[in-house]
Image: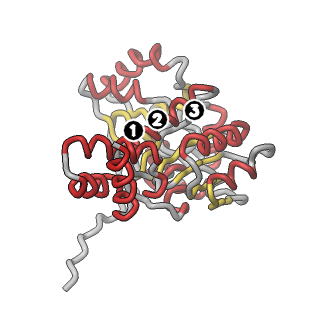
Amino acid sequence: MSEALPDLPILNRTATPPVGLVLVPTPIGNLGDMTVRAIATLKAADLILCEDTRVTARLLTAYGINAATAPLHDHNEDQRIPALLERLRGGQRIALVSDAGTPLVSDPGYRLVRAALEAGLPVSALPGPNAALTALTLSGLPPHPFLFLGFPPRGGARLAAFAQLRAAERAGLSATMIWYEAPSRAGETLADLLAAFGDRPAVLARELTKHFEEIIRAPLSELANRFANADPRGEVCLLIGPAPAELEDADDLDARLRTALAGATLKQAVADVTAATGLPRKQVYARALALATDQ
């Protein structure tokens, strides 16, 4: 017998949004993705904090929202926090939005939220659009666990960051990884991903929820080659699947086996390394036997 479904709350279109700071997601491309609660919250706000007021103005105009707006971005967030906390203490309703998607996810606002929480002021959030999760659900890659990593560093720091993640995989991390990237840097990033992680299933998702939405599912090598000299158009999400067991490097396997053989019998060392790597037992045994013979 299936469990009874829980009662769903009745939509109350006249309920006044609570006072305090409210994080309000906005559409990532399609204006029709605004929720009833999001519209009501923005209409009731004493102030809407925007990553870019010009971008948010188009959304507010589309829904007839006339609340006051002010910019909140990386360059002014620290300076604005004291005055905003005073407004919250005075019982005002302040909404925080980013240019698109869920606030704080690779967007400004974290420092304000943290300051409000530390001051004991009310903070709430509405559910809504998010590019990373939309891309994940459309990718065809394992949906959990996943690791969202925001925008990768630029230049040489990017490859170093990828190398650290690859080292984490060697230590046991197994997750679908997700990045945001600017179209002009997508080709370089794909090349660095291939160099760091090797070839594996990957996805480039662009223009999510928009008219020209495209989800390109292909081996990482194919994506890197396709966009080596041609930038994709629109906002981009890049995803790679977990490392297959067969990508375990020969050097990694040898190192694991030498460590295991130093303190255990051949049989036990093979069992331990097989369990740790997920590699076929025959492959591990053959390599262990070769190493034992060389000693």
Looking at numbered disc 3 in the image, what kind of residue is underneath it? Leu
The residue carrying pointer 2 sits among few (fewer than 14), some (14 to 19) or many (20 or more) residues within 10 Å by Cα, namely many
Residue positioned 64% across, 49% down in the render: 62
Give the structural element (helix, strand or loop) at label 3: helix
Q: Secondary structure at mark 2?
A: strand
Image coordinates of residue 189 in percent, x first then y, are 64, 39
**Residue placed under numbered mark 1 in the picture:** 22
Spot occupied by residue 159 in the image (x, y as percentages of width and height)? 57, 32
User: Which amino acid, mark 1?
Assistant: Val
Give the quarter of the figure containing the C terminus: top left
Indicate which disc, 1 or 2, sits on the residue closer to the N terminus. 1
Q: CB under 8 Å between callouts 1 and 2? A: yes
Q: Residues within 10 Å of mark 1 (few under 14, many from 20)?
A: many
Q: Which tag is nearer the camera, tag 2 or tag 3?
A: 3
Please, what secondary structure does the residue beneath circle 1 have?
Answer: strand
Q: Nearer the viewer, residue 213 or 125?
A: 213
Which mark identifies residue 96?
2
Q: Is 197 positioned to the left or the right of 83 in the image?
A: right
Q: Which mark is residue 159?
A: 3
Residue displayed at 80% across by 46% down: 230
